Structures are given as structure tokens and as C-alpha cells.
Image: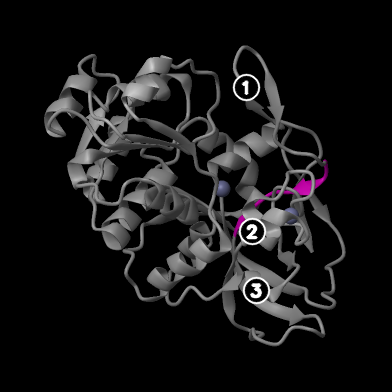
């Protein structure tokens, strides 16, 4: 089988031919049909997250990793203890796999398993920038109904991340009270999921006019360009005095600064931080208390949330978004394009 591996941080991934694994016990082997390219792949590739003030937080604990955590593929072989999945059928793989032994894993929160013990596909163990992916248990395979092949895998990270972040906002939000910052792949999936799962059409903020136009087309109640000097006033007017929740899919010093202003004087607001752009941010403490404000980090989603989301997907409740397709051999160019903001919406790689 052929895999694209990180041999050195920030250097192009290297094509490596190696033996295809044979699943044993509970393991299953999936032949990759498409693998989404997620923004976090850039950080995993770089080897660090920006911790602010020049601090680098490691994003990857091993070399020779095959990235790719949004995998959709065909089940081709199984270990002797596997019984509930069908060879020849296509599945989305839930990649946020834990050690299976710690408290988090035992409480249904294996996506919170420690980075030192987690077995996240494409992050800690080999993922989908490859012909085949070995998965440790059939319980991580999900039927995607008639979702297009190029989109299905993206529900395992960006779709799930958007779903979980939306669940963390006050779900009584009306469309003009929920702001999404960032109209990239995550932002556009969040728009579709917000509409179908929560009946909300959030307002969207970005700095790229083209991405804002796409967000408007995909159902944003309104779009705002963060480069406008009066963007806070514009949002304040549209939201009748400020929003109740912000989901920040960028997560930079600039977006935190802007996003926290969008609440106005409203109390009980929630800031859901998802994006990993990085940096540092300081808070005016009394305002946190007076405002009864919450800043909550949201990291991917649980296996239970994946079940909820995929049920909506299979019932065709979530309108599909268009995905750009590229050949797996274009992986290095694709990562560079994503890093430079040159990809509109979602992109996947096909071996
Ligand atoms: Zn991801
Ligand atoms: Zn664990």
C-alpha cells in the first residue's frame, strides 16, 4: 500500500510504499475512497500549535505519521472477532479513538483521552492519506447513507466538531443571536448543521469577501466583513444589541478580541472556542463575573455525538455541501493551498 507520511515537520510529505496490514481480533481494514483535508492537518504537519509569545505547543508526538482523520472507505477485511459490519460496504471512520482504559474512555469520552495514550487516527496513529486504514474496532465505523463519497469523511471531524460546538451554545438562540467566526470548511458545515439540526441560521463573520458570499449562499442569516472598522456596530444592529453565543472557528488573538465585543452588554453569553490558529488573550476579569460569561473550548465530539450526527446525515436532514476533489498525490499542494487560505469550502483527497 501507498501512504504519504510526515518524515520531518513542515517538509513535504513523502510517498512511502509498505505492506498492507492484516486485521486481527477486533480490527478492521478500510480501503480509502476519500479523505478530507482538515485545517488541523496543517498544525499536525507543522509539528506545533502557536501558544503565543513565541511559545510552541507540540501537535504531534511521533514521526513517520500518515495524517488524514476524515476517512471514508470500503471495508475490505476484518479480524476474527468482528461481526456487525459488512465487507464491501462503505463507512465513515470515527477517528477520535482513546486508549480504552482510562476514566475518560470508560465514561464515553474517549475523545478526551490523554494525548500520550490516545490513538486518534491521522494524529497519533496512521490515518487516511493512504490506500488503506487499519481501525481497532468495528464500533468506529458509521454508515453514511447516500452522502456523496467526497463529503462523508468530513462528518467525522469538521461535521462532528461543528455539531458538538453548536450543541454547546444556548440552543434557544435565534438566528441573529448566534455568530460564527470563520467561513472556511468548518464554518460552512456548521451552517448546514445549524439549519437542519437546530433550526438556526447563524450570522457569519470572516475577512474574505469570497468566503462570505459562499456563507450567504449556504444559508447564513447575514454576513459581516471583519475588516470593516464598524463591524461590531453592524453586528450589534443586526442582533438587536449583541449576540448570545459566538462559535470561533479561527481561534486567533484577533478573533477573540472581536468576538468578545459582539456580546454587547448581554449576560450569560457563551464563547465556544474551536479554531486552533493560536496565540494568547487576556481577559477583563470583572466583566466575566458581571456578564456571567463562559468561554468554553470545544474539541471534536464524542462517539455518542457522532451517532446523533450520523443519524441526521443518514436521514438526509443535512443538506450536502460541495467538496473539491483532488488526487492523493496532490497532498502537499493541497496542504499549502489550505494554509494560504486558497481553498473555498471543503477539499478531499482520493487515492
Ligand atoms: Zn479535523
Ligand atoms: Zn483513554
Label 1: which secondary element: loop
Q: Disc 3 marks which residue?
A: 139
Q: State the mark number for residue 95.
A: 2
Mark 3 vs ligand 2: CB under 8 Å?
no
In which quadrant is the N terminus drawn? bottom right
Label 2: which secondary element: loop
Q: Is residue 3 left or right of residue 306?
A: right
Q: Is residue 265 above or below residue 272?
A: above
Sequence-earlier tag: 1 or 2: 1
Picture coordinates of residue 328 (x, y %)? 63, 54
Which residue lies at the image location 59% right of the left edge and 17% below the top edge?
A: 52
Marks 2/3: CA distance? 11 Å
Marks 3/1: CA distance? 35 Å
Which residue lies at the image location 44% right of the left edge and 65% below the top edge?
A: 309
- Label 2 Cα crowd, 10 Å radius (few <14 / some 14-19 / many 20+): many
Q: In the rendered structure, are the residues bearing label 3 and label 1 in contact, judged by CB atoms less than 8 Å apart?
A: no
Q: Disc 1 marks which residue?
A: 51
Marks 1/2: CA distance? 25 Å
Sequence-earlier tag: 3 or 1: 1
Q: Is residue 218 left or right of residue 6?
A: left
Q: Is residue 210 above or below residue 31?
A: above
Sequence-earlier tag: 2 or 3: 2
Q: Main secondary structure of the magenta part?
A: loop
Picture coordinates of residue 5 (x, y %)? 77, 47
Picture coordinates of residue 20 (x, y %)? 83, 68
Residue situated in front as seen by the camera: 78 or 119: 119
Amino acid at each position: 500500500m501507498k501512504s504519504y507520511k510526515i518524515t520531518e515537520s513542515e517538509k513535504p510529505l513523502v510517498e512511502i510504499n509498505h505492506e498492507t496490514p492484516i486485521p486481527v481480533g477486533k480490527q478492521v481494514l478500510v480501503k480509502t475512497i476519500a479523505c478530507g483535508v482538515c485545517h488541523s492537518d496543517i498544525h499536525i504537519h507543522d509539528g506545533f500549535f502557536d501558544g503565543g509569545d513565541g511559545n510552541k505547543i507540540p501537535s504531534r508526538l511521533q514521526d513517520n505519521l500518515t495524517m488524514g482523520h476524515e476517512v471514508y472507505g470500503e471495508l475490505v477485511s476484518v479480524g476474527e472477532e468482528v461481526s456487525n459490519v459488512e465487507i464491501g460496504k462503505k463507512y465513515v471512520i470515527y477517528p477520535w479513538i482513546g486508549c480504552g482504559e482510562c476514566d475518560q474512555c470508560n465514561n464515553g469520552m474517549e475523545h478526551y483521552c490523554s494525548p500520550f495514550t490516545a490513538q486518534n487516527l491521522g494524529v497519533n496513529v496512521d490515518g487516511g492519506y493512504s490506500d488503506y486504514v487499519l481501525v481497532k474496532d468495528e464500533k468506529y465505523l458509521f454508515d453514511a447513507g447516500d452522502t456523496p463519497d467526497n463529503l462523508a469523511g468530513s462528518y467525522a471531524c469538521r461535521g462532528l466538531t461543528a455539531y458538538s460546538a453548536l450543541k454547546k451554545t444556548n440552543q434557544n438562540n435565534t438566528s441573529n443571536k448566534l455568530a460564527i467566526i470563520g467561513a472556511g470548511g468548518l464554518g460552512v458545515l456548521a451552517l448546514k448543521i445549524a439549519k437542519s439540526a437546530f433550526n438556526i441560521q447563524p450570522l457569519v463573520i470572516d475577512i474574505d469577501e469570497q468566503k462570505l458570499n459562499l456563507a450567504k449562499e449556504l444559508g447564513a442569516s447575514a454576513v459581516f466583513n471583519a475588516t470593516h472598522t464598524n463591524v461590531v456596530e453592524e453586528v450589534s444592529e443586526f442582533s438587536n444589541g449583541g449576540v448570545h453565543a459566538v462559535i470561533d472557528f479561527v481561534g486567533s488573538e484577533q478573533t477573540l478580541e472581536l468576538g468578545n465585543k459582539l456580546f454587547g452588554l448581554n449576560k450569560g453569553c457563551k464563547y465556544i472556542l474551536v479554531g486552533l490558529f493560536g496565540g494568547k488573550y487576556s481577559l477583563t476579569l470583572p466583566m466575566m463575573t458581571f456578564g456571567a460569561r463562559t468561554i468554553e473550548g470545544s474539541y471534536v465530539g464524542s462517539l455518542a455525538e457522532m451517532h446523533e450526527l450520523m443519524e441526521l446525515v443518514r436521514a438526509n436532514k443535512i443538506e450536502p455541501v460541495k467538496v473539491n476533489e483532488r488526487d492523493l498525490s496532490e497532498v502537499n499542494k493541497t496542504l499549502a493551498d489550505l494554509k494560504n487560505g486558497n481553498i473555498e469550502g471543503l477539499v478531499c483527497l482520493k487515492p
